[in-house]
Amino acid sequence: MIMRILYDHQAFTGTIYGGVSRYFTDLMGNLSTSGHTVNLATRFSNNLYLQNKQYFKGKTYTYFLGYRWTCTILSHLNRLGAATNLLEKEFDVFHPTFYNPYFLGFVGKKPFVITYHDAIKDKFGEKYGHLDNVSKEVKKKLLTKAAKVIAVSENTKKDLVEVFDIEEDKIVVIYHATNFHEIQPIKVTNLPTKYLLYVGSRNDYKQFIPFIEATAELLKTENVSLLCSGGGEFTAEENEAIYKLGISHLISQRKVNDGELKTLYQNALAFVYPSKYEGFGIPILEAFASDCPVVLSDSSCFPEVAQNAALYFNPESQTSIANAVEQIIMNVDLRTDLITKGRKRFADFSIEKMTQQTLAVYESVI
């Protein structure tokens, strides 16, 4: 069955890159090349993943009123365009890319499907602060009205049932995937001789400061660096912690593209992910695709995603963290074993598989 799927602008206005927009571009690209009709209702976007995509008919732009106000204005214009596409009804299924409920007044009786990525704000909002612009009540409304809900892990499905009281048979688990194995590495200069790699943001539940507190003495003793990719420059709080721990010479942050990131993974002793909670954890797959050993918290979805292809620690225990990191630094055989297991586990995830499973969800609601 040839499907006509409409996606909207939400994940692509004001975001140059990121996990959600990458997920949707991978999905749309694979559907498009498979012969299905993909309509992305986005008139304006600077998202890097949309470059040279045939299904993106919009325009890039300059920040003529500064970043915030430009994105706000263009978001409203994109929403108006998406509403127009919805009213035209020239689609079989609508898949909004985030949780703004604007579309409820325009979608009519056409079915829509929502992907739920993680329950971090909805479970821990008061503890970790305001992580997105949509209330739990609004999400509950959308999840209830959706024809189907896609959860990115069994752990996330469990959260949907517990937090929103969504019926289990309405939820379909479809794992994320990545084409990171196809990325060609790009040379990176001035890499440390020995380093651990941390990827992504470092706020709150990500456990960055507790992680460096647990490993500082080991890093100094073994002269191992911690290289951080993404997440922006270190905050004042992070710099203070790094200075007090005496590891300023061992920790650095770099802004890199995908090719450079591939090189960082390939040359690291290990990729470390001390986060207390995630919906899936795409960097785990990136590490697997780069033959990089993986060291993870034993919490949330991580054991489900990585299974036996990672070394785990208790994120609440500094002793557990330090012991795991010491093992990965000192034990070459362990690193080799994890690389082998990571390659095998990575084979269970593919964009093609993700696309076919999502297509089956679309077909089930029309």
Image (cartoon, rainbow, N blue to C red):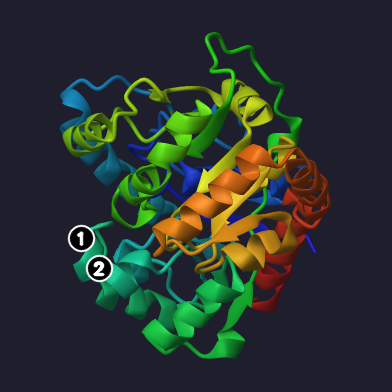
The secondary structure type at the circle numbered 2 is helix
User: Which label number is shown at residue 125?
Assistant: 2
Tag of residue 232: none
SS state under label 1:
loop
Determine the image quadrant of residue 62: top left
As displayed, is residue 224 above or below residue 64?
A: below
Q: Position of residue 348 (x, y in %)?
A: 79, 57
* Pick the front one: 192 or 281: 192
Q: Residue at x 62, y 66 (%)?
A: 303
Q: Amino acid at mark 1?
A: Gly
Rendered view: 247 above or below 277: above
Visible residue check, residue 149: no
For residue 191, above or below residue 331: above
Number of numbered callouts drawn: 2
Look at the image and tell me in which quarter the N terminus lies: bottom right
Residue 141 locus on image (x, y percent): 34, 79
Hey, which residue is sitting farthest front in the picture?
A: 221
Give whichever of 141, 349 is nearer the camera: 349
Identified at 58% across, 62% down, the residue is 302
Which is nearer the eye, 338 or 52?
338
Please tell me how crowded label 2 is: few (under 14), some (14-19), or many (20+) other residues with Cα within 10 Å.
some
- At horizontal 64% and vertical 23% (from top left) the residue drawn is 263
Quadrant where the C terminus sits is bottom right
Contact check, label 2 and label 1, Cβ < 8 Å = yes
Q: Is residue 210 visible?
A: yes
Q: Which label number is shown at residue 129?
A: 1
Mark 2 to mark 1 CA distance (whole Å) = 5 Å
Where residue 309 sits, quadrant-wise, is bottom right
Q: Percent position (x, y) of residue 207?
A: 36, 52
- The amino acid type of the residue labelled 2 equals Gly
Q: Position of residue 212 (x, y in %)?
A: 37, 42
- Residue at x-position 73% and y-position 69%: 360
